[in-house]
Structure formats: structure tokens, C-alpha cells
């Protein structure tokens, strides 16, 4: 007030300590101050290069499953915090009710290669009550001896959840891509739209060691 509305000027007579008051309702409350402080502390403790990119596949596994080709075998399997898509191309007869090309949308906060390895395990070892809708579809094809091929791609790269934030960008992005997907060719269940964010759990006090 003293700096910008000097005493004796026209604006100083209109805007001064007697005519303007600052109430607590116009400032941030204690909860916002605490969240802002915690966010700054966490951001400083997290390495800037949180989400590496590139490929660390061995020569025998090239071309990389995540975007690798014969011309450029190295892909992007090390990327973190992404929404990905698995596209299953099969030789299902045209008279079959299911489509020849089915798509599965998923997410991972860690490296994409780690999530891919888990999917690969589900598709190698059959589980009675487990796995994903992707692995169940693959086992249906295997049981019928139907040839198939899976291609992987990154749909969107997101920011990881930060303690104190209201929303999780990763979970919201996955749900948005599932909603946009064609229901006839989507392997995702609509019940996935109601699932709670699991990335917030690690910041709960009961889970902090």
C-alpha cells in the first residue's frame, strides 16, 4: 500500500489502510499452505530425470517391443508414467463375433518394460482367477489355436502423482483413452472407470515407514 499508493496522491486517498482491509478469507488457508510446502519439498527430493527414455533391451530381444523396427531396433521401453496400448491382431474367421483386431489400454507408473514383463508372464502362465482382460483374450486365442500378434505403443506420457494433489493425471488419462476407444474392439471393461487411484495409497500415513 505504501509503495504503490503514496499518501497525498489521488489513488492514495482512494486506496489506503483505512479504506482497504485484508481478511483471512482472501488468503490461502492452512491446508493449502501445508500442501504447497509438502509439494515443494517432494519436488526437490525427486530427481529431475524421473522418467528416463530409451531402450536397454539385449541384442537377442531386438527389435524392442516398444516402437522398435528392423531399421531402428531400439525403442522406448524405459519410459515411465505412461498410458500404453496393446493391439492384438489375430486370424479369427470373419464369421466370428469377435473382431480380428482388439485393443487393450493400460497404465504404468514405473518403466513400461516392467509392465510388459508382467503381461508376458500372464500370457505364458495361465491363471484361473487373475491376469488381465488382455491375457484372458490371448488364452482364448491359444485355446482355439488361432495365430495372433501383439504390437505395443505409448498413447500418452503423464506426470506422476504428487502427494497433496487432488487428482492423478495418469489415472485420468487412462480413463479418457478407454472412453474414447471403440467398444467393439476394446478389451477393457467399463468397470475400470470406477476403480480408485492406487498411486495415492503410498502417500498415506499408514503406509509410510
Image (tube, grey):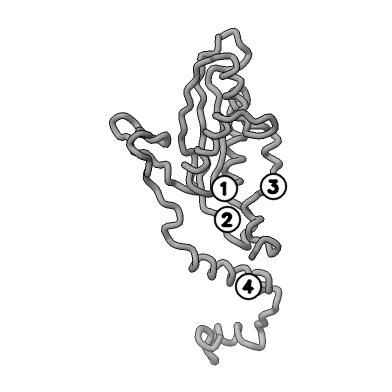
Quadrant of residue 180 within the rendered picture: top right
Q: How far apart are the alpha carbons under marks 2 and 1?
A: 7 Å
Name the residue: 38% across, 34% down: 61
Q: Which residue is mark 3?
A: 196
Answer with left or right where residue 72 lies relative to residue 130: left
Location of residue 11 with respect to 162 vertically, above or below: below
Query: In x, y percent, where is residue 99?
Result: 57, 17
Query: In x, y percent, where is residue 198?
Result: 65, 50
Q: 16 and 135: which one is in front?
A: 135
Mark 4 or 1, which is nearer the eye? 1
| Quadrant of the drawing holding the C terminus | bottom right
Label 4 Cα neighbours within 10 Å, binned few <14 / some 14-19 / many ≥20: few
Name the residue: 51% across, 83% down: 4
Location of residue 43 with respect to 52 vertically, above or below: below
Q: Going from the N terminus, do you reach mark 2 or mark 1 first?
A: 2
SS for callout 3 = loop
Q: 58 and 49: which one is in front?
A: 58
SS for callout 1 = helix
Which circle marks residue 33 in the picture? Answer: 4
Q: 95 and 121: which one is in front?
A: 121
Q: How far apart are the alpha carbons under marks 4 and 3?
A: 26 Å
SS for callout 2 = loop
Label 3 Cα neighbours within 10 Å, binned few <14 / some 14-19 / many ≥20: few
Are the two marked residues, 4 and 1, in contact with CB atoms closer than 8 angstroms? no
Name the residue: 57% across, 48% down: 170
Which circle marks residue 99 in the picture? Answer: none
Which circle marks residue 161 in the picture? Answer: 2
Quadrant of residue 11 within the rendered picture: bottom right
Label 2 Cα neighbours within 10 Å, binned few <14 / some 14-19 / many ≥20: some
Location of residue 141 with respect to 201 vertically, above or below: above
Q: Which residue is mark 1?
A: 170
State the residue lying farthest toward the bottom: 8
Amino acid at each position: 500500500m505504501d509503495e504503490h499508493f503514496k499518501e497525498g496522491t489521488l489513488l492514495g486517498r482512494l486506496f489506503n489502510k483505512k479504506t482497504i482491509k485484508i481478511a483471512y478469507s482472501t488468503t490461502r488457508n492452512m491446508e493449502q499452505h501445508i500442501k504447497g510446502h509438502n509439494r515443494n519439498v517432494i519436488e526437490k527430493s525427486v530427481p529431475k530425470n524421473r522418467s528416463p527414455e530409451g531402450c536397454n533391451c539385449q541384442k537377442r530381444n531386438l527389435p524392442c517391443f516398444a516402437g522398435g523396427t528392423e531399421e531402428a531396433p531400439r525403442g522406448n521401453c524405459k519410459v515411465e508414467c505412461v498410458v500404453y496400448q496393446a493391439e492384438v491382431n489375430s486370424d479369427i474367421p470373419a464369421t466370428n463375433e469377435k473382431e480380428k483386431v482388439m485393443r487393450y489400454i493400460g497404465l504404468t507408473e514405473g518403466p513400461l518394460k516392467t509392465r510388459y514383463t508382467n503381461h508376458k508372464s500372464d500370457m505364458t502362465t495361465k491363471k484361473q482367477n487373475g491376469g488381465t482382460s488382455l491375457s484372458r483374450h490371448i488364452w482364448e486365442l491359444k485355446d482355439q489355436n488361432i495365430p495372433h500378434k501383439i504390437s505395443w505403443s505409448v498413447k500418452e506420457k503423464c506426470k506422476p502423482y504428487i502427494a497433496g494433489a487432488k487428482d492423478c493425471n495418469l489415472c485420468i488419462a487412462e480413463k479418457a483413452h478407454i472412453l474414447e476407444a471403440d467398444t467393439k474392439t476394446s478389451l477393457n471393461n467399463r468397470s475400470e472407470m470406477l476403480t480408485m487411484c492406487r498411486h495415492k495409497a503410498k502417500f498415506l500415513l499408514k503406509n509410510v515407514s
